[in-house]
Amino acid sequence: MDNFLENYGWMIGLLVAMWLLQFFMSFLQMKRYYSRLSALRREGPTATGMTGNRLNTRTYGVLTLNKADNTIRRAEQLSGFTVFSSLRPVPALVGMPLDAVVPDRKPQRGVSTKEWKAFCAAADYLRKHVEATAQAGAKPALPTVSQEVALSQA
């Protein structure tokens, strides 16, 4: 047993150190994501949609709604394999009517099919939010939590 620890102890220690580093880096990525999401929420109702699964890359799409005319004020996406990924603006969707972001339509130029699915999920949540506030007779309020909606990849 002592021979095993002499030969492989350093390898086990290295694996544990790498796991802790990965955990720390994931924490930093999550902190950056939520701070950006908080800034977007101050601009209007915000929703996050997701597509993908554990086996292939997940893509998150974040939409912020302009309450005055139901157009998209901000659109940002997050995708990638590494913990260095961060939200990036998608200017192709800014100014589009919310009702134009539906799965049946072809994605805008500069937006991949996977990103489009994530944005459609976010738009669906925002449409439900607008309908609910309209039925209640109140002005749309900022959601307290951004809801992630997963689309299946059937």
Image (cartoon, grey):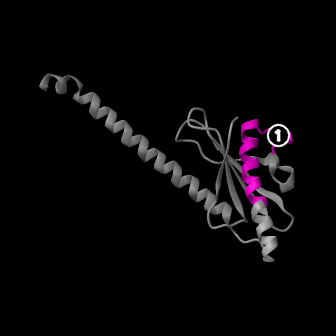
* Mark 1 Cα-neighbour bin, 10 Å: few <14, some 14–19, many ≥20: many
Q: Which residue is situated farthest in the left direction here?
A: 2
> Is 13 positioned to the left or the right of 122 in the image?
left
What segment is highlighted magenta in the picture? 103-127
Residue at left offset 48%, top offset 50%: 28
Q: Position of residue 32 (x, y in %)?
A: 55, 53
Residue 62, position as x, y percentages in the image: 69, 52
Name the residue: 61% across, 57% down: 36
Q: Position of residue 122 (x, y in %)?
A: 72, 53
Residue pictured at 23% horizontal, 25% vertical: 8
Q: Is residue 114 magenta?
A: yes
Where residue 63 sits, quadrant-wise, is bottom right
Looking at the image, which is closer to me, 139 or 108? 139
* Residue at the disc numbered 1: 107
Amino acid type of the residue tagged 1 in the rendering: Pro
Above or below — where is 148 with respect to 57? below
- Which residue appears at 74% of the width and 42% of the height? 117
Quarter location, residue 135:
bottom right
Q: In the shown orientation, is residue 150 left or right of residue 92?
A: left
Tell me the quarter of the image containing the N terminus. top left
Spot occupied by residue 39 in the image (x, y as percentages of width and height): 64, 62
Residue 128 drawn in magenta: no
